[in-house]
Image (cartoon, grey):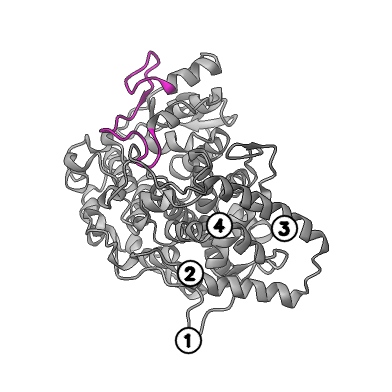
């Protein structure tokens, strides 16, 4: 929402969302955006040019040799960004004419990118419960849980440009106690969100000098979940850091030294160059045909399957327990070196543990029919943080409904079954069950190498490697694998929000 009296001097009507958007120049100067007036075809050409300043001031991030992604050949990204007029205008406004690597990779799916940018911009720039510098610091805290230096450096730079409280960037011990109090729910949300209870909420909103209002807390929780999930996308898609974020003086230099500007964390393992030879399965043709045949058979069996409620529950429990066995080969040896972003991490030894663990008392299954995003989470978050519910819902729906009706070289294919299996498998690992879904379909549709990739990207994304990315769906396009990552990102974010918002609901009642 734009405060009354601001529009005349500090806003411009944006065709992207037909609402007034405040353009912040963080050094205190309001910079009017350059409005692109070319045709959509020409705008697509702008985004596909060489990485240099264009006639309209839009430039692409230059990476040392690997382009926007260390997993995806550069030409496949640059040649596939025919964005709409409104999206190009918004990118020019949001990024001051620069398209970063994350946006370029996500731009493989322009319709989703538009929904993402709307939500991302609203969370970080528009009027809301939290001040701007708090928002970027919370983004830093969230991304640091997964050692995502690309996101940490980006928001350290944003924070520096605001020009306040620069000492906070020295580490958590230098930021206010109020922000440090978020450490507990930050680590739990990032790694084991099912542990969040109303007691965690009560500890934050209790009366006192460092307390949070419910509106502020909801804003913070959405930011935390957003950047945890975004870290999954960054690592899962091999998104390279933007060299431009190192071009500021001060604290940023030791966090993102120029020597490391061209390296993604995924480069620290072997075989991660996009120009290298990916793993090839000699049976890729039969692999694709077999998957399509299984989809066809499952569709036919749905009509005859009259499974009882007990049987459906048994299938869920079986899939949940089998997820315990999904571990990447050599996982213990794949140690990510210490990172300078550790200064923003409290209790670094706290990490992901399986929801259902052998020989232990496990938390109860989260029943989606008792607390769902559509019926409960949406209304709560929208009530406490105006309009964000609509933007989140649009983003969730766009990722889940996105389809081009093809699979690899096959056209006219209904992929809804596969998309739902991917989304629900993530929720299954987080202990969330939909009683109307047959979890037996997951084992039929998701091969083991894909499950390993999903679990790694979702639960410990900093360990994702190019080898994992190449190990599944050998015949599929890179854009289809990026779509997988969009589904994993949104499923993870929604799972975190469901647990956090349920705890807030319990506190309120």
Local SS, label 2: helix
Label 3: how many residues lie within 10 Å, few (<14), some (14-19) or many (20+)?
some
Label 1: how many residues lie within 10 Å, few (<14), some (14-19) or many (20+)?
few
- 4 and 1 marks in contact (CB < 8 Å): no
Asked if residue 175 can be seen in this view, the reply is no
Q: Which residue is mark 4?
A: 494
Nearest to N terminus: mark 4 or mark 1: 1
Q: Which residue is mark 3?
A: 298
Q: Which residue is mark 1?
A: 359
Left of 403 or right of it: where is 222? Answer: left
In the image, which disc is placed on residue 201?
A: 2
The image quadrant that residue 55 belongs to is: top left
Nearest to N terminus: mark 4 or mark 3: 3
Q: Residue at x 68, y 69 (%)?
A: 370
Label 2 or label 3, whichever lies nearer to me, is 3
- In the image, residue 380 sits, relative to residue 356, either above or below, namely above
Position of residue 392 measured from the top left corner of the image (x, y, whole percent): 57, 48
In space, the residues marked 4 and 1 are separated at their CA atoms by 28 Å
Of all residues, the one furthest to the front in this rendering is 282
Label 2 or label 1, whichever lies nearer to me, is 1
In space, the residues marked 3 and 1 are separated at their CA atoms by 34 Å
In space, the residues marked 2 and 3 are separated at their CA atoms by 43 Å
Nearest to N terminus: mark 2 or mark 1: 2
Position of residue 59 measured from the top left corner of the image (x, y, whole percent): 36, 23
- 2 and 3 marks in contact (CB < 8 Å): no
């Amino acid at each position: 929402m734009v405060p009354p009296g601001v529009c005349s001097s500090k806003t411009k009507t944006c065709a992207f969302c037909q609402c007034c958007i405040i353009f912040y120049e963080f050094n205190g100067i309001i910079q009017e955006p350059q409005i692109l007036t070319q045709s959509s075809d020409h705008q697509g050409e702008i985004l596909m040019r060489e990485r240099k300043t264009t006639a309209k001031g839009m430039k692409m991030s230059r990476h040392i040799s690997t382009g926007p992604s260390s997993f995806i050949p550069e030409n496949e990204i640059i040649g596939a960004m025919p964005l709409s007029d409104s999206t190009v205008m918004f990118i020019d406004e949001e990024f001051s004419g620069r398209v970063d690597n994350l946006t370029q990779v996500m731009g493989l799916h322009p319709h989703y990118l538009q929904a993402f940018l709307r939500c991302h911009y609203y969370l970080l720039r528009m009027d809301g419960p939290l001040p701007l510098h708090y928002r970027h610091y919370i983004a830093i805290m969230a991304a640091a849980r997964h050692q995502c230096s690309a996101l940490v450096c980006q928001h350290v730079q944003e924070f520096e440009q605001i020009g306040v409280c620069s000492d906070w960037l020295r580490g958590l011990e230098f930021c206010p106690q109020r922000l440090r109090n978020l450490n507990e729910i930050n680590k739990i949300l990032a790694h084991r969100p099912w542990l969040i209870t109303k007691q965690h909420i009560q500890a934050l909103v209790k009366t006192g000098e460092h307390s949070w209002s419910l509106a502020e807390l909801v804003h913070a929780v959405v930011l935390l979940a957003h950047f945890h999930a975004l870290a999954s996308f960054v690592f899962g898609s091999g998104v390279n850091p933007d060299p431009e974020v190192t071009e500021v003086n001060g604290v940023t230099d030791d966090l993102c030294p120029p020597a490391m500007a061209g390296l993604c964390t995924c480069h620290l393992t072997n075989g991660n160059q996009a120009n290298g030879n990916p793993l090839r399965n000699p049976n890729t043709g039969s692999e694709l045909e077999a998957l399509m045949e299984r989809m066809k058979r499952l569709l036919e069996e749905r009509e005859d399957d009259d499974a009882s409620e007990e049987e459906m529950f048994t299938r869920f429990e079986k899939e949940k327990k089998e997820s315990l066995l999904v571990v990447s080969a050599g996982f213990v040896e794949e140690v990510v070196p210490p990172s300078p972003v550790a200064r923003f991490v409290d209790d670094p030894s706290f990490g992901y543990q399986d929801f259902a663990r052998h020989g232990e008392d496990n938390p109860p299954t989260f029943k989606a029919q008792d607390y769902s995003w559509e019926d409960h989470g949406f209304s709560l978050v929208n009530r406490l943080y105006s309009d964000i519910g609509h933007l989140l819902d649009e983003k969730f729906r766009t990722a889940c409904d996105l389809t081009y009706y093809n699979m690899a070289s096959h056209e006219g294919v209904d992929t809804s079954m596969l998309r739902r299996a991917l989304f629900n498998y993530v929720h299954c690992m987080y202990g969330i069950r939909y009683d109307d879904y047959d979890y037996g379909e997951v084992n039929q549709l998701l091969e083991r190498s894909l499950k390993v990739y999903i679990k790694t990207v979702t639960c410990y994304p900093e360990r994702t490697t190019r080898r994992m990315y190449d190990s599944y769906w050998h015949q599929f396009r890179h854009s289809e694998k990026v779509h997988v990552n969009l589904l994993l990102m949104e499923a993870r974010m929604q799972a975190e929000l469901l647990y956090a918002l349920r705890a807030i609901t319990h506190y309120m009642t």
